[in-house]
Image (cartoon, helix red, strand yellow):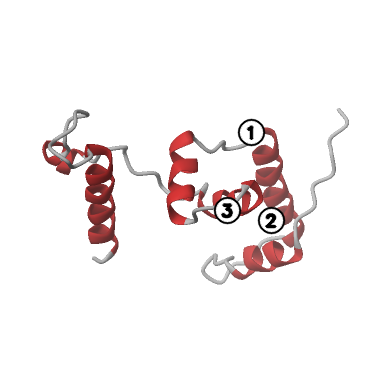
Amino acid sequence: MNEKSIVVPPEMRKAFFAAETHHGLKYDPVVLLRMLEAAIRWLSENPIEATYTDWQQFCSEKPGMGVEPFAGWWQRRMFFNREPEVPEEIKDLILPDVESGFFKPEILNARLLEAYRRGRESK
């Protein structure tokens, strides 16, 4: 099988080896680098695709920006643990999809979710 060459950026390689902690044991750097290359190869063959919700979040955080900034934004976030669309703890507080007076439920719900996330991050 003719595999494509994987290039590990020098900064990634440095971070990878700096994180190596095996309680005083040292492992073969060639083996560790092969493991890192295997992980990068897997990711290149199995890309983690952004969702429409990710695009909406990007557009709300950085209005007027294009596709190239989105790619960098997504690359920084694709390994973060995703929270459920609506956490169980606040489902009862979410407004239905109907207009409620002059308030738009999607705006209020987005703000409620953001407040919830900020609260969790502040702990």
Residue under numbered circle 2: 32
Few, some or many C-alpha atoms within 10 Å of disc 2 (few <14, some 14-19, many ≥20)?
Answer: some
**Numbered disc in front, either 2 or 3:** 3
Q: Which is more foreground, mark 3 or mark 1?
A: 3
Location of residue 16 (image quadrant): bottom right
Residue sitting nearer the eye, 99 or 18: 99
Q: Give the residue number, with chain letter if any, for mark 1.
A: 46
Q: Which residue is mark 3?
A: 65
Where's the C terminus, which quadrant? bottom left
Instruction: Please give the name of the residue rendered at 22% of the width and 38% of the height, measured from the top-left corner.
Output: 105
The Cα atoms of the two marked residues, 2 and 3, are separated by: 38 Å
Q: Which residue corresponds to the image point at 50% horizontal and 42% vertical from the top-left?
A: 55
On the image, the x and y values in percent for residue 47 come to 62, 36
Point out the residue furthest to the front here: 102
Structural distance between the alpha carbons of marks 2 and 1:
21 Å
Quadrant that contains the N terminus: top right
- Of mark 2 and mark 3, the one earlier in the sequence is 2
Q: Secondary structure at mark 2?
A: helix
